[in-house]
Amino acid sequence: MSNIKKILLRSAGLGMIFRSLLAPHVVLANVEDGVETVRSHRGTTSKQLEKIHFHDRVELVKTLNQKSQDMEEEKKKVTLFDAQLETEKLALDKAALAAGFSEDSVEVLKDKNCFMNTITKEDAKAYGNLSALVYDIDQNKRLAKVGSSVTRLDREITTAQDEMVMLEKKLTQIPLAESDFRKFVKDLRVFGINLDKDATIATVQKAINDRWGGLNETVRSLQIQKRLSDSQYLENARQVFDHNLQGMTYKVEGVFHRNNGEFSGAAAFDKDKNKLVLTFAGSKSTTDWIKNIMGWNSKLSKSHGLLSNISFHSGFGSHLDDNADSFFSFMRGWLTQYKEQNPNKVLNLVGTGHSLGGALGEIFSAAAKEMAEVMGIKINLGIMTFGAPNTVNANTLQNYTKLIGGAGNVVRFAHSYDPVPAIVFWKSAPGATTIKGDTSLFKDVSGTMVLPIRVNPHSSDEYYHAAEKVFEDWEKNLSPLKRRLDSVTKLEESKTAAQKAIGKIANEAHGLLSALANQDKNSAAVFEDEYQAYINKERQELVMIQESLKAMAKDLKERKEKHDLFTLQEQEEFVKNFDQVRQSLAEKKSFIEGLEKDLAWKTYAQTITDDFANLLDRITQDSLSLSVLAIR
């Protein structure tokens, strides 16, 4: 084929390509950074982002700039709050030191509903009175021993109740595997349940329920016998208590005694406040329990199934066991009756006592809370002790604190020179705070508050008489600490709010940036056409403002030459208008400068142009190659 023919074919091919590129039904678009582009064919529609005009883009940029300013303002707030927090926390540390709090103790004050933050001096006096009273009754034998029949009935009642609790657990633990099931059936013999080897799950369930029902009837019968046996004893106890509780609204609901029948404590109920106070006398002498090293809380965990994940310091084991039968016999019966009469009411429960009685109060009130919650009764627990030793083993303090609802639910009064509150500290984990003089409130290893008393060490009467005054002094020291803590809390909340605002603004700005970038790519051609007209319009408005300013200056000059003086009102109006025009001029200049710099879409426009040129080159090369092949 001749060279002329080849040239004609090439020209014809390029002409066809250019005509197809210029056809209105074909869209060539750049695929870049996730911008959605589609090559459309005859009869189809392009699916691109909706194009916007340049003035819309300007509004997007304005909004984005405002977000930037808003973010800077919030960042300034965070910086300011950080500086204020540093100052306030230093002041808080000083106030905490003055009140005897350690750093982690201060956190307790944030819980507005904890026992420590809700008790009053009247409460402190009442609990001190009850603690001193039961201690005095015990020491001076103001109540005779209960009869042996009562102690026997208590043991029988608690034994039956414990077996009922174990049967309830067994009922939920019936295994399905054949070998495990047969062993389970065999183990039921310890409860007096004897079944043959062909027993089914239904048979086992019925046998357990029958045994439980029989025990329940036994308990009811024993409780009736006990009420008849100790009714006179309870009446005598109420007379002793009522004489010493004048002016208070508590009524004695039950009396606790040791296994030998000696008085050991009482339960007093305030119906108006829906509050049950458990108060314990402890041992006969302050040295009995120190000498006792008979082990851990065996009876509570093994027999009654309570406080199983909490250990108490050696020296309390026998005292817990000695008081357990009487206590649990009363509590299970009282709570059952309470639930029947108050099915959905939260019970306020307080444990208190002096010396070892305070230790028993801490332990038994926690056990009562656990027992009540198993029965479906909600409890608000508080504990206030007077001259009590530390009770909970350091390794299980966290479990105990969780059970009682937090460290702020225990308040302990202690004389600075009373050795009893600190006597078990040396056996505990390190970190116990040493009492400082006579005015400190310190936090012991169990995370509870201890109030100082400036009286003779360890006297229950002195603790009682000093409780109200010491509590007032403590509150005075606490007031500035609470104010500082409130200030720190508010600053922390404000800082958090500012940080959240920064996050919100950042998310909104990210969305605006994405929209702006996509529109820059999609609307580049539109912006290219409209940008110059838009900025020219802004420049014309700038000239008009400048002319207004010149006109005002000219008017001022002419009036000055004519000695046409301004009135005071005219001067004020002129200055106001002149300042407004100058402000408008400055804003317009700044806006135009921004427009002159804001040419981001130019990059996309240039990319599209370059890609278009590259495409044409490639098409030309392909076309020439095809033409050559065709000629060959």
Image (tube, grey):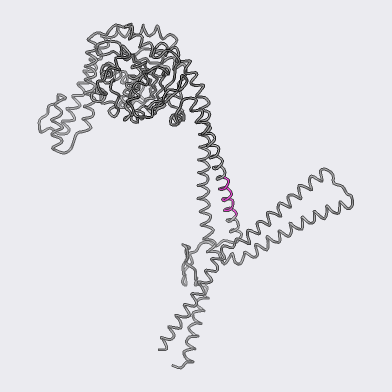
Picture quadrant where residue 253 is located: top left
Position in image of residue 487 (x %, y %): 53, 32
Q: Nearer the viewer, residue 385 or 56?
A: 385
Q: Residue at x 12, y 32 (%)?
A: 199
Q: Residue at x 14, y 38 (%)?
A: 178
Residue 497 location (% of width, % of height): 52, 41
The answer to whether 526 is drawn above or below residue 439 in the figure is below
Main structural element of the magenta stretch: helix, strand or loop? helix
Q: Nearer the viewer, residue 288 or 476?
A: 288
x then y, percent, for residue 201: 17, 34
Q: Quadrant of residue 256?
A: top left
- Identify the image quadrant of the C terminus: bottom left
Quadrant, the N terminus? bottom left
The residue segment tinted magenta is 62-73
Residue plotted at (86% across, 51% down): 560
Q: Is residue 222 magenta?
A: no
Question: Residue 240: x and y, percent?
Answer: 36, 7
**Residue toward you, 23 or 83:** 83
Left or right: where 403 falls relative to 491: left
Residue 310 visible somewhere in the drawing: yes
Camera sees residue 329: no
